[in-house]
């Protein structure tokens, strides 16, 4: 039986909960497909799936360092409202793409004042423990195309 190792393609169903037991995310309808060893998924989950095979179920708790990183206070910034020209109605929770040092990142508005806007560039799951329940559905060798692209094609993967 094929086990998950570098360059295998695996599909799995998952439920992700925070430490309070609230569901943050889960696979919708069809399993998620990924290419093992290619940074398609967070490091902690990849580590937990290593060596597993189809039909296995695992529960794993992943700390922020192996998930979406620690929460960075310096990623929260207050900027002049004039930075948001052309945006009429700015509300907390809205997301914008921002470019800094040539890198595109997603920032979320956390506070809106008359002249300034506070935005947070942390990943929404930064600083959180991630509690996954995973059921592995399929494990197979990746195709040459998939290895060249660095992701899985077809159901649950990239369609192109
Ligand atoms: Zn591709």
Image (cartoon, rainbow, N blue to C red):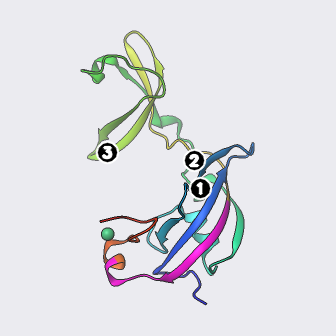
Looking at the image, residue 4 sits to the left or right of residue 33; the answer is: right
Residue picked out by circle 1:
65
Q: Is residue 110 magenta?
A: no
Relative image position of residue 149 (x, y in whole percent): 32, 72
113 left or right of 65 in image: left
Find disc 2 in the rendering and name its residue: 70
* Disc 3, SS: strand
Q: Residue at x 37, y 23 (%)?
A: 79
Which one is in front, 37 or 72? 37
For disc 2, the neighbor class at 10 Å (few under 14, some 14 to 19, many from 20) is some
The residue at the far top in this view is 114
- 122 vs 92, nearest the viewer: 92
Which mark is drawn over residue 26? none
> Above or below — where is 72 with respect to 62?
above
> Secondary structure beneath disc 2?
loop
Sequence-wise, the earlier of marks 1 and 2 is 1
Q: CA distance from mark 3 to mark 1?
A: 22 Å
- Return the residue at label 3: 104
Looking at the rendered image, the quarter that the C terminus falls into is bottom left
Image depth: mark 3 or mark 1 in front: 3
- Residue drawn 59% across the image and 73% down it: 137
The magenta-colored residue range is: 133-145
Left or right: where 16 falls relative to 36? right
For residue 140, above or below residue 62: below
Along the line of sight, which residue is nearer the eye, 155 or 94? 155
Picture layout, residue 133 above or below residue 79: below
Indicate yes or no whether the magenta region holds residue 136.
yes
Quadrant location of the N terminus? bottom right
| Position of residue 74 measured from the top left corner of the image (x, y, whole percent) | 48, 36
Q: Are marks 1 and 2 in contact (CB under 8 Å)?
A: yes
Which of pointers 3 and 2 indicates the residue nearer the eye? 3
Q: Is residue 90 above or below residue 38?
A: above
């Amino acid at each position: 039986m094929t086990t998950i190792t570098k360059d295998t393609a695996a599909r799995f169903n998952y439920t992700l909960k925070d430490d309070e037991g609230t569901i943050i995310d889960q696979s919708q309808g069809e399993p998620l497909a990924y290419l093992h060893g290619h940074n398609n998924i967070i490091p902690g989950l990849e580590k937990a799936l290593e060596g597993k095979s189809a039909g296995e179920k695992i529960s794993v708790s992943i700390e922020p360092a192996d998930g979406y990183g620690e929460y960075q206070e310096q990623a929260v910034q207050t900027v002049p409202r004039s930075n948001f020209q052309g945006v009429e109605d700015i509300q907390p929770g809205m997301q914008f793409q921002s470019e800094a040092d040539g890198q595109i990142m997603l920032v979320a508005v956390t506070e809106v004042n008359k002249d300034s806007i506070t935005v947070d560039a942390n990943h929404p799951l930064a600083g959180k423990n991630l509690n996954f329940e995973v059921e592995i559905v399929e494990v197979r060798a990746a195709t040459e195309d998939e290895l060249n692209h660095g992701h899985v094609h077809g159901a649950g993967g990239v369609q192109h």
